Amino acid sequence: MANKPAAPIPMSTEELAPWGVLAAGLLIMLGSILPWAPANTIFGSFSVAGTAGDGKITLACGLLIATLAGIYLTGNVARKTAR
């Protein structure tokens, strides 16, 4: 008789939320540097990068969000629990 693997322990929202925030920060940074508007016209092709305009601001915000989530996940900040 084969042993069944143990059932995975479900993660609570408090444990899962920081990972979602980290992923969101990384996706914001990725979206800030990728090309947003490539176009081919009869006059030629062009592309608008995500860093054009306010893309540098969103890149900095994404970096801040990802950094804070990483610090939280490494345990280098005190965690408060809900009462």
Image: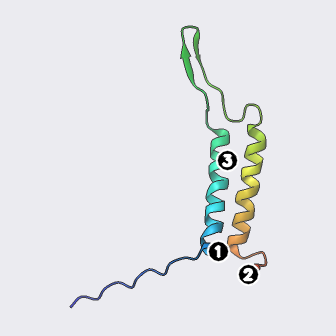
The residue depicted at 69 percent of the width and 65 percent of the height is: 70
Look at the numbered disc 2 and give the secondary structure of its residue.
loop
Above or below, comparing residue 57 to residue 62 in the picture: above
Q: Residue most toward the bottom? A: 1
* Quadrant in which residue 4 is drawn: bottom left
Q: Residue 26, image x and y in percent?
A: 64, 53
**Residue lying furthest top in this view?**
42
Q: Residue furthest front?
A: 83
Dot 1 corresponds to which residue? 14
Please tell me the numbered disc located at residue 81: 2
Disc 3 marks a residue whose amino acid type is Met
Q: Which mark is residue 50?
A: none
- Amino acid type at image mark 1: Glu
Q: Earlier in the sequence, mark 1 or mark 3?
A: 1
Closer-to-camera residue (45/80): 80
Q: Is residue 24 left or right of residue 8?
A: right
Q: Residue 29 has which mark?
A: 3
Distance Cα–Cα, label 1 vs label 2: 9 Å
Q: Earlier in the sequence, mark 1 or mark 2?
A: 1
Where residue 78 appears, as percent x and y from the top left, is 79, 78
Q: Residue at x 66, y 61 (%)?
A: 21
Secondary element under disc 3, as helix, strand or loop, is helix
Determine the image quadrant of residue 56. top right
Determine whether, in the image, residue 5 is placed left or right of residue 61. left
